[in-house]
Amino acid sequence: MSDVKETRFRVEGMDCASCASKIDTAVRRMPGVADVSVSVTAGTMRVQHDTTSDLDAIRRKVSGLGYTVTPGAAVAAEKPAGKHEHGPGSIHDHDHGPRDDHAHGHDHDHAGHDHGDKPKAAAIEGLHGHDHAPSEGPWWKGRKGRLTILAGAALVIAYGIGHLFPSIATYAFVVAMAVGLVPIARRAIMAALAGTPFSIEMLMTIAAVGAVIINATEEAAAVVFLFLVGELLEGVAAGKARDSIRSLSALVPKTALLEEGEGRMKEVPAEQLAVGAVILVRPGDRISADGTIVEGGSAIDEAPVTGESTPVRKETGDTVFAGTVNGDAALRIRVTAAAADNTIARVIKLVEEAQESKAPTERFIDRFSKYYTPGVVAVAALVAIIPPLFLGGVWSEWVYKGLAVLLIGCPCALVISTPAAIAAALSAGARRGLLMKGGAVLEGLGKLTAIAFDKTGTLTEGKPKVTDVVAFAQPAEEVLRLAAALEAGSSHPLALAILGKAAEDGIVLPAAGGSRALGGKGVTATVEGKDIFLGSPKAAAERVTISEEVQAATTALNDDGKTVSMLIVDGVLAGAIAMRDEPRADAAAGLKTLRDAGIKTIMLTGDNARTAKAVGAELGIEVRAELMPEDKQRIVGELQRDGFVVGKIGDGINDAPALAAANVGIAMGGGTDVALETADAAILHGRVGDVALMTDLSRRTMRNITQNIVIALGLKGVFLVTTIVGITGLWPAILADTGATVLVTMNALRLLRPIKG
């Protein structure tokens, strides 16, 4: 519906999943609201609503539940029809179809694509506001921190009064309890009115009031204080996961040196940089915007953003990312993305949206807890009533036990067990350049039993490199020197490979005159008074006689998947240059890691069979070549019918059908070109080894979730038994709940450790 809007709110003060449930229930009941998604870990609420919805009333409703709400920006709610929506250019618009390995035409324009500035600024601005410092400051300055300190002080004073004046000790503890309980009870009543009668605050209020009625005032005050301590610890732990991903934005400098013409520079806020502006980045400075280098070359330290330990050499025309560190030379950079749309902002937005998306396990536990909490209330009532009524038990003893059971039954630890682990894993993955769109994708990655890879740009670098310079009538260095002179100024991939090799070898190029491209055959020019031709073996054979020995050498190179270009100087075959799109440096090791983990690997490519098989043999992977997009989709379907859970990894539009058909579709690419908006997951920095890291992260996360559920239910089970048999009382009961919650959260935070690989 065109009149459906989506508004994001920043919500502060949530510390466990029951908070999210209360807010969800309350807002969902309001007029005009179609859907609500609340994330504790992201600290956000997304509301889909129509034009009749009163956003201020929504804010007041959530504030009434005890949370601080900041409205964000409204954006049109456009939901994709299917799992993927891979329009043209959604990943990389490359053509990986069957090729003639010998064609060496130079009539192609391979200039960089203009990806444009996408109109997302408003949405992201509303979500982030460019300031991702911890929103609530130190714990003792927050509202919960102050309340906990006050309740603790009141409890200490009550103990002092009770020791000095025993006759009024009961009243002192009632007052101490009220200091902490009144805000809790208020939240419980607001939640009940908003549709959540069995909130943790309601259970706490019932238990505390019940303890006062049976004259256990000291324990009532202590239990309220311990409850507040537990809530505070939960909030601190949740904040660590929340701030882990937001801290990425701190990498981007606040100011930039903007070029204003005639060499004049002006320092401006980075968030004001417009697309197309040119900025100066001095050696040692952080780059303040995504952009393209227009002048200069330098080693860029991308470790803060990508985890890549070795600085990457960038030259004119190369892409750089906001937050990375310029190394040894000044750079002039043209801005390609506004601050709200740079790579880091998009990563933060993606991860926060992913944290709002519930995993299957989390959805199951949410459903379970809706029955679990009322069930606990019923069991507590039965424990308090049945023994005194029918078995001659003492009322005060069994009411006390019933209240303890009520506290043990608080579902916080159980409900937080899954989202805490998933939020930590999503944050850790994002810092490594592994982006996953939600818990369902994270769970699915660990279940993969087969992964299908594209070849070009996924298993290989996506651009050819010179592998062999073969000397016939001229020395190898001379063959490369003349060929590079001929190619100077060309943007054809094979030409760039030759020029790159010449630059690498430090060859000084002579000038070429009368350069002329011969469509589909090669290029000719005059260099140092000699007529030079560089082209395919077929075109060369039309100009000179190719000996059987040369033909055999050419065939051997072709069998290795290499493209061969032949150089003719004044009518004599001088030599040949072989090029190939080489496998990524970590491809073989990355694939071996997957195979060792029991995952089947297969290459699906549109490239010709000879090239594909040569690369496949080197990498040790099964190859299916000369495929059309529908063929790749069909093969993914065949694997699924054979019982495999299939992941598909690719970077081109011809991979889109297979990405959509796979159980998990993963985009492989870098920076702003990556299909963050369409794939289930993305590997930002093009490392094949990161695929194995992604599946391993998924499996570790699922193990962590299992541990959390065991901790949550195990502790409750133990204390339930010890309470009923009379070994433990109210204090251990509340410790069982808050202790389990803190243990579960801290266990989940172990996933935040940097991912090694």
Image (cartoon, rainbow, N blue to C red):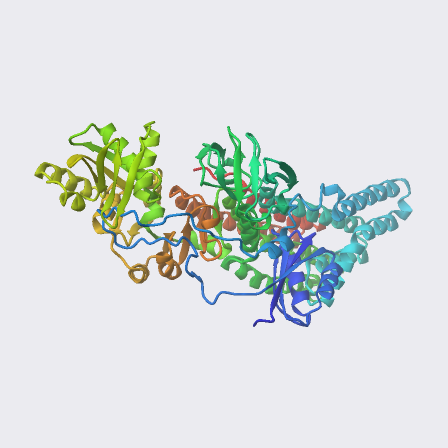
Q: Residue at x 53, y 55 (%)?
A: 118
* Residue 1 place in picture, x, y as percent: 56, 72
Q: Position of residue 640 (x, y in %)?
A: 33, 60
Q: Nearer the viewer, residue 510 or 584?
A: 510
Q: Residue 733 location in percent, x, y?
A: 67, 50
Which sits in the foreground, 693 or 181?
Answer: 693
Q: Which residue extends farthest left?
A: 548
Image-quadrant location for residue 584 = top left
**Does residue 83 appear left or right of residue 419 in this picture?**
left
Regarding residue 746, the answer to whether it shows in the image is yes
The x, y position of residue 205, in whole percent, is: 75, 58
Asked if 186 appears above or below 298 in the picture, the reply is: below
User: Residue 4 sits in which quadrant?
Assistant: bottom right
Nearer the observer, 72 or 97: 97
The residue shown at (9%, 38%) is 547
Nearest the viewer among 268 and 558 is: 268
Is residue 210 something that shows in the picture?
no
Q: Is residue 490 above or below residue 361?
A: above
Position of residue 630 relative to residue 133, above or below, is below
Is the C terminus in the top left, top right, bottom left or bottom right quadrant? top left
Q: Is residue 675 left or right of residue 745?
A: left
- 623 to the left or right of 67: left
